Image (cartoon, rainbow, N blue to C red):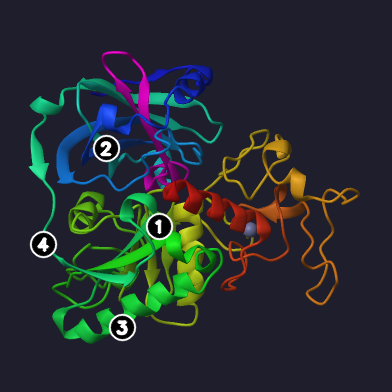
Amino acid sequence: MKRTLIIPLLALLCAQVSAKTDDFRHYFEDKTLRINYLHIGNKNQESIELCGFVVRNGWYGTRAELADPFQYGDMLVEVFSNLSGRLIYSRSYSCLFSEYRTTERGETEIAKMEECAVIPMPRHDFRVRISSFDRRRTPTVLVDTVLVPGNLPLKNAGKNYKVKTLHRGGSPKRSLDILIVPDGYSKNDRKLLEYDVKRFASYIMKCSPYKEFRKNVNIRAVIGYSEDSGITQPQNNIHVNTLLNCTYNAIDLDRYLMCPGVWNLHDVADDAPYDAIIIICNSDKYGGGGIYNFYCTVYNRGEYPDYVIVHEMGHLIGGLADEYYTSDVSVQDFYPEGVEPTEPNITTLVDFESKWSGKVSQGTPVPTPSVGKDHPDFDRIGVYEGGGYVAKGVFRPSLHCTMNGAVYDDFCPVCRETLEKIIRYYSK
Ligand SMILES: [Zn+2]
């Protein structure tokens, strides 16, 4: 399964436009197939090793637009009909592995990280291709193999957790389904767990654009308890046994709270429909993290959990970049010069036309000068220098946004519109 070759980007793009929207029943059963794999490597090498196949009833993703129209991620999963060669499904996502590769440790040390592809179950033989894109958008094909549904060693999904509905919008087949999974709540924390899942659901539903799309969003929670209370903090020598084994200090950044056990996370999540998974961690230490079409985490106590959850969901659902550039982060050269980032809310001006140029009024200087909070132009959409962790060469659309400062329900028009488009995509 381990095969690495460079293929032209154009070939990928041409293939992606071929999937039509009304093909679901022809190509797929109303089931979900999860392909578990390990993403292995460091800065200079990578490979994928397929490890297992899990099946469940029902497909809850979109059926109307089977080829991913956004592709904001570093990874691309494509499914082709083996008979016709036609692209029948694709999904882009990002992963912790891509971030790890840009750290100092990732320059030399090999990591093995769990990932999975969640796809509708093909009826017939299919070809799956998994590609990664580096920061310069050069694709590398890591898997290209034909699979036969009848021959797959399938494991049935589900662990029979209780699932609680917190907000009911529409049919799960035509809505954005958000699933909350708790970590670090022991059976003694039962009341806190129930209180927290409700509280976080209300943070989401009181924030734009989710509140305007109430009928297109569902929020559910898996009620799953951990052996121990709390979350692992390696730097403070705290190690606990929890449902998901989330941990601080992911890729050597203390406040980066992540879930290395991605397969187990999906095993736990499989009792409910989901398009997006949010993990709520029972901890008073500031932390969180969100990766596009992967999962996001948030801590449950402290000053800003309402802000942290909608900010991390901006990464998870919208593929949005951090618009700040002052905090310490462990990634290096994340946005190389001369390359337009995929994230819709930052630009290097290499291809600004593909970003928010249409929203900038004529005569707005580039870079747009910063003005204070009480200035009449504080809300002006512009091209402000600084964003994506660097002060120079990367530009953001607004002086204030939930993807920038710690302000709840303050997405700038560019970020808000991106999230709206994605909610609409799931609602088709
Ligand atoms: Zn923004």
Q: Which amino acid does label 3 sit on?
A: Tyr
Badge 1, how many Cα within 10 Å: few under 14, some, many 20+?
A: some
Taking 149 as reference, is 195 left or right? right
| Disc 2 + disc 3, Cβ < 8 Å | no
Precedes in sequence: disc 1 or disc 3: 3
Q: Which of marks 1 and 2 is nearer the N terminus?
A: 2
Measuring 54% from the left and 55% from the top, which residue is drawn there?
419
Label 1, on which residue? 252
Element type at mark 1: helix
> What residue sits right under mark 4 in the picture?
160
Q: Which amino acid does label 2 sit on?
A: Pro
For the point 73% across and 63% down, the residue is 399
Task: Return the residue at label 3.
Answer: 195
Q: Nearer the viewer, residue 178 or 41?
A: 178
User: For residue 120, which numbered disc appears in the image?
Assistant: 2
Give the image quarter of residue 132. top left
